[in-house]
Image (cartoon, helix red, strand yellow):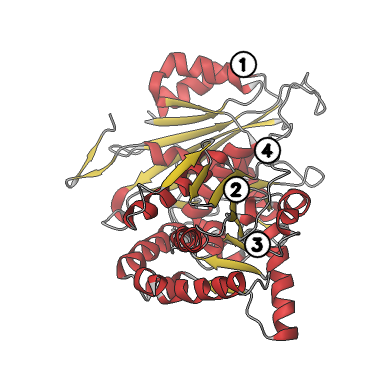
Amino acid sequence: MALRHLLRPYQVEIGRAVMESVLNRRGLTFTVEIARQGGKNELSAQLELLLLTLYAGIGGNLVKAAPTYLPQVNISLARLKERLADAGLAPFYSPEAGHVLRLGKARQIFLSADASSHVVGTTAHILLEIDEAQDVNTEKYHKEFRPMGASTNVTTVLYGTPWDQHSLLEEVKQRNLELERVDGIKRHFRFDWCQVANHNPSYRSYVEAERQRLGESHPIFRTQYLLDPLHGETGLLSPLQRAQLQGDHQRQRTPQPGRIYVASLDLAGQASVTAGDASLPTIKPYQDSTILTIGELDFSICDDVVLEPRVNLVQHYWWTGTPHSALYPQLLDLLKNVWHCRRIVVDATGLGQGMASFLQKALGSLVEPFIFTSQSKSRLGFQLLAAVNAGRVKMYAPDGSPEFAEFWHQIDLAQSCFKPNQTMNFFVDASKGHDDFLSSLALLAHASQYLPRIAHGRIRELV
């Protein structure tokens, strides 16, 4: 009755299946995919509340694990405390060791599933839950968490949203689907954003705005809202996305009066540095060209839904084999005196740190140094895909130039691959070419988010 009163129908369906397995000691393993912010954490807390109450006089452990202690485990612990208080049980539960809540003889234990955590020795008597299972290491689950319920035939629930086909969630999900075909017992539950939105109009409005902002093909939208897993290495941009990237505006040799320009600078490795130099981050492969990309901001697309301007690529500068020291005076003149750029994102990885520092001293807060790491490059890739999908970045029209040809050569060769913890990488296979124009494009899309915006019908400088 409590589940029906507090939860939506799809949550109640899952809750009933889990409770039936627990109370009848069937020891089933369930996989639950609910679109982001669709209520999986609330369902989990309500199950924990109900089971703690039922087993308070009997005793036993419930165990819940999440990929990180901070913030994920703490959030789950705080939510359960709130539900216990809502049920009038605040005077009757007690915390233990900071990560355990006891109600009578029953205990809810919260654990980190981080690779470095030590969890062996805990027993799950009543329920074992794995939150954000797509981010939990498969080996750690099978070696350290799954055995917690071996002696008790514990019911297990893995919650999450898909990522790639190699994740723990996807592995167990596929096994569940195969078992369902054999015995007809439902073990996998899937509710995408449309099903959640049927019970929450505000959620529908939010996700539709996200779809417009990111595009339906964006990896984040596909996995977190459509619940579609990603499959291996693939081209960064589809034919449709490449068509969206191509604009019809002309390349500009000089700035136009009254326009706002931004820039990105992808710096080459120095000729004296070999590709195998251990001082260079592996995430940013050796390149022998420096690319300066100029973009013009177009605010005409901005409205109550589209909050960011379009950036139209209007000029490329391409230097190969030129030392940074020789480039600095020309770069400074182009950025400051020719294009009057309002924002400049500079590749400050490795040897680029010196150039970024010099430009920052000369141009101040207009310059943002960008250091490529696996995490920062992943965020940059997601930003670029969102900008392309929303039509917020456009390449100038064909002009027969080497820059135009090389730009599209790199875009056509660009690959993406998806990695654990919901990150991605984008690159051009080093055996086929460079990715300097590609990196400069991604940096330009990032630069466009840090500039003047529409406010009260006019452009206002960011403070």
Disc on the earlier residue, 4 or 3: 4
The three-letter amino acid code for the residue at tag 1 is Ala
Q: Position of residue 184 (x, y in %)?
A: 68, 86
Disc on the earlier residue, 2 or 3: 3
Query: Label 1, on which residue?
Result: 326
Going by the image, does 425 lie left or right of 5?
Answer: right
Going by the picture, which residue comes out furthest to the left?
456
Q: Residue at x 32, y 51 (%)?
A: 307
Q: CA distance from mark 2 to mark 3?
A: 31 Å
Disc on the earlier residue, 2 or 4: 4
Going by the image, does 179 lie left or right of 403?
Answer: right
Q: CA distance from mark 3 to mark 1?
A: 44 Å
Callouts 2 and 3 close, C-beta under 8 Å: no
Q: Position of residue 99 (x, y in %)?
A: 53, 40
Q: CA distance from mark 4 to mark 3?
A: 28 Å
The three-letter amino acid code for the residue at tag 3 is Leu
Query: Label 2, on which residue?
Result: 404
Q: CA distance from mark 2 to mark 4?
A: 50 Å
Q: Report the front residue among 105 and 82.
A: 105
Query: Label 4, on which residue?
Result: 117
Q: Residue at x 62, y 14 (%)?
A: 325
Asked which secondary structure carries label 1, the reply is: helix
Asked which secondary structure carries label 2, the reply is: helix
Query: Label 3, on which residue?
Result: 230
